[in-house]
């Protein structure tokens, strides 16, 4: 399946901002994160199509997956 | 040295030093300003009349070596909202006032001769009123430079810009920071209250005095644990790198970034104004990504944003301001937004209220969405000079909506709604509706739990649990606002079990008392109820605790949701 993967803050360093990527069906969000070499203990918020999601969630063709480290402001 | 209250009467130009009444002893910051305003200000008074009082108070821990404790609270009845108001800011003044033993400064009355301007100077002996001519009409930057020359570079300065002199309802009170730039008691028009008292600035004498600490060793131990919890927190670290503007991309991704005067929830130009772009720009131009607004801050969310030649353009460049000029006004040029921010710092205007007012003006046809040049022109030629258009904008978003017949006016109690759409992030809608001070995200920052996963997580689109979330955060915030602490300690306090106990230990060691966590919660509840009672006595009812009707009628993309929390649920906020 083809997904749009978006990275934010320092997760972009030496990676990318946004990329179309091919993954096998049944790939979880966690699998995607591991494949990008992002340490799981640095994860903040995850979203699929602008809704919060869990690590074990499986996106479907065309989904947008957004991966954030811990961030805040206000 | 015993703490004292300074009372300054601008009707007869007299000053007094008073003992701290027993009932005020345990209060500081917002808890103290709201207690004093509730006790001494007639709730129905005109905010710019002689019966309003302007109260300054450092926090309970201000002036001590406690990390992040340099916030200065300022309170009065607000000319923007008509409610009670507390706004707090960094800068050097809170710590200086606390070291001089000033627990609060109460400015009352107003001069009969409206033609003259005055200054206050605060030192160990109290306050001195002097007539002022040299800096009247000047912007904040020039005012501070002239006062540095006159009184020495270390003098503390609390000042109003031309907007406060012109009594604009969005005028702020500016506080000199360690680099002689501005930090702002931003919201609710407190600068107009200071202007109505005919006080251009308050200068504070530097001192070598130290704040008394009852148990020095316990204080030191608690401060180590407290500072460590802040420094170790990953959100603190991200704030240091990207500033609060790191939020542009995540709030945009969530579909909750109010765009084009609150007509959609995502902004196409988000990358160009994002925290990531800002960081890269600052580094490339030789600015400073990290900067502290007061000594002792270990988070350093501020920054110095440089222009293309590497010179100073602005600092304290916040998400709210960048969102409002950016997404809400559709301006994609970060340099133009930085210039606008700097002009607002100089004029002394709230950098949330004014850009939201511009977005309403854009909808009203005054200028086009995205017209950054137009914004800068109107700021320089109209707002700064006090033309009729400038005053309409300077009086805020509600004022612009009325003047131009716009129905989509994002305000609660006439204060502009900040950078999170309540349709797509429902907890913050409860905060906007029920806050004792008009729409204000900092009163109960549900974004932490609705979006950022801090303090647990609660679906931003669900109606469930939002009232309780907002209530708990509003209670905790009122307590934190009393300590002199920056609100950004809350990110550590919500998720690190060592942070809040260390903060309570700091207060106990400072005063030699034995507060518990329950006492702190009760303090927060007391403050909210005190403020709410003032508002009820001023004529507000539960019908004022509502969002503008367009939020219930106009769905917002991408989630296509409306504001759908019932009035009964909103009113249940006060069941505590």
Image (spheres, rainbow, N blue to C red):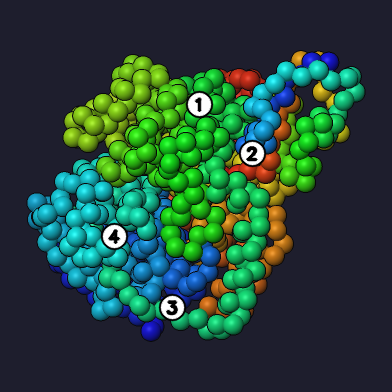
Q: Nearer the viewer, residue B252 or B310?
A: B310
- Relative to B8, B553 lies left or right: right
- Are discs 3 and 4 both within one chain? yes
Query: Which chain letter matches label 1?
Result: B
Q: Which residue is mark 2?
A: A10
**For discs 1 and 2, the disc positioned in front in the rendered view:** 2
Q: Identify the disc placed on residue B157.
A: 4
Q: Identify the disc placed on residue B20.
A: none
- Relative to B493, B393 lies left or right: left
**For discs 1 and 4, the disc positioned in front in the rendered view:** 1
Q: Residue at x 31, y 23 (%)?
A: B373
Inter-mark Cα distance, 3 to 2:
40 Å
Q: Secondary structure at mark 3?
A: loop
Inter-mark Cα distance, 1 to 3:
45 Å
Q: Secondary structure at mark 2?
A: helix
Task: Tell me, yes or no, whether the two marked residues, 1 and 4, touch with CB atoms within 8 Å.
Answer: no
| Percent of width and height locating residue B509 | 57, 79
Q: Which residue is mark 1?
A: B272
Q: Identify the disc placed on residue B211.
A: 3
Q: Secondary structure at mark 4?
A: strand
- Are discs 1 and 4 both within one chain? yes
- Relative to B184, B148 lies left or right: left
């Amino acid at each position: 399946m083809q997904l749009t993967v978006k990275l934010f803050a320092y997760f972009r360093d030496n990676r990318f901002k946004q990329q179309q990527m091919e993954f096998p069906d049944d790939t979880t969000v966690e699998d995607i994160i591991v494949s990008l070499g992002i340490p799981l203990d640095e994860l903040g918020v995850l979203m699929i199509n602008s809704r919060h999601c869990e690590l074990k969630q499986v996106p479907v063709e065309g989904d947008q997956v957004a991966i954030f480290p811990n961030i805040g402001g206000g | 040295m015993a703490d004292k209250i300074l009372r300054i009467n601008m009707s007869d130009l007299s000053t007094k030093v008073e003992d701290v009444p027993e009932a005020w002893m345990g209060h500081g910051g917002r808890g103290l300003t709201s207690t004093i305003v509730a006790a001494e200000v007639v709730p129905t008074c005109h905010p710019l009349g002689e019966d309003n009082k302007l109260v300054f108070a450092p926090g309970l821990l201000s002036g001590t070596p406690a990390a992040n404790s340099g916030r200065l609270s300022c309170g009065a009845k607000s000319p923007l909202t008509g409610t009670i108001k507390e706004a707090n800011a960094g800068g050097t003044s809170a710590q200086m006032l606390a070291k001089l033993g000033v627990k609060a400064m109460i400015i009352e009355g107003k001069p009969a001769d409206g033609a003259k301007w005055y200054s206050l100077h605060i030192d160990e002996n109290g306050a001195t009123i002097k007539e002022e001519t040299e800096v009247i009409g000047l912007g904040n930057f020039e005012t501070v430079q002239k006062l540095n020359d006159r009184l020495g570079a270390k003098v503390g300065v609390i000042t109003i810009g031309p907007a406060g002199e012109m009594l604009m309802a969005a005028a702020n009170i500016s506080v000199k920071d360690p680099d002689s730039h501005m930090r702002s008691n931003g919201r609710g028009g407190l600068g107009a209250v200071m202007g109505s008292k005919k006080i251009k600035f308050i200068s504070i004498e530097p001192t070598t005095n130290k704040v008394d600490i009852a148990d020095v060793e316990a204080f030191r131990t608690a401060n180590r644990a407290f500072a460590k919890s802040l420094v170790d927190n990953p959100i603190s670290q991200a704030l240091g790198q990207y500033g609060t503007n790191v939020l542009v991309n995540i709030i945009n991704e969530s579909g909750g970034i109010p765009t084009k005067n609150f007509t959609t929830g995502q902004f196409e130009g988000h990358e160009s104004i994002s925290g990531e772009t800002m960081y890269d720009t600052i580094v490339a131009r030789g600015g400073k990504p990290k900067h502290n607004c007061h000594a002792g801050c270990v988070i350093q969310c501020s920054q110095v944003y440089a222009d293309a030649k590497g010179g100073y353009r602005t600092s304290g460049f916040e998400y709210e301001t960048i969102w409002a000029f950016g997404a809400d006004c559709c301006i994609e040029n970060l340099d133009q937004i930085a210039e606008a921010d700097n002009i607002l710092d100089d004029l002394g205007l709230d950098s949330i209220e004014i850009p939201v007012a511009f977005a309403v003006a854009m909808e009203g046809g005054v200028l086009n969405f995205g017209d950054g040049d137009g914004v800068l022109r109107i700021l320089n030629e109209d707002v700064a000079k006090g033309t009729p258009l400038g005053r309409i904008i300077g009086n805020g978003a509600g004022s612009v909506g009325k003047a131009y017949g716009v129905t989509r006016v994002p305000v609660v109690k006439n204060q502009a709604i900040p950078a999170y759409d309540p349709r797509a992030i429902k907890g913050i809608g409860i905060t906007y509706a029920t806050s004792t001070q008009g729409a204000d995200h900092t009163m109960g920052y549900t974004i932490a739990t609705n979006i950022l996963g801090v303090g647990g997580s609660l679906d931003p689109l669900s109606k469930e649990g939002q009232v309780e979330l907002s209530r708990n955060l509003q209670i905790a915030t009122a307590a934190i606002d009393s300590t002199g602490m920056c609100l950004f300690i809350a990110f550590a306090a919500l998720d690190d079990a060592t942070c809040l106990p260390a903060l309570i230990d700091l207060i106990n060691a400072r005063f030699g008392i034995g507060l518990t966590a329950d006492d702190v919660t009760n303090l927060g509840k007391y403050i909210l109820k005190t403020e709410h009672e003032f508002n009820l006595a001023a004529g507000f009812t539960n019908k004022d605790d509502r969002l503008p009707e367009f939020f219930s009628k106009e769905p917002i993309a991408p989630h296509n949701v409306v504001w759908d929390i019932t009035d009964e649920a909103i009113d249940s906020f006060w069941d505590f």
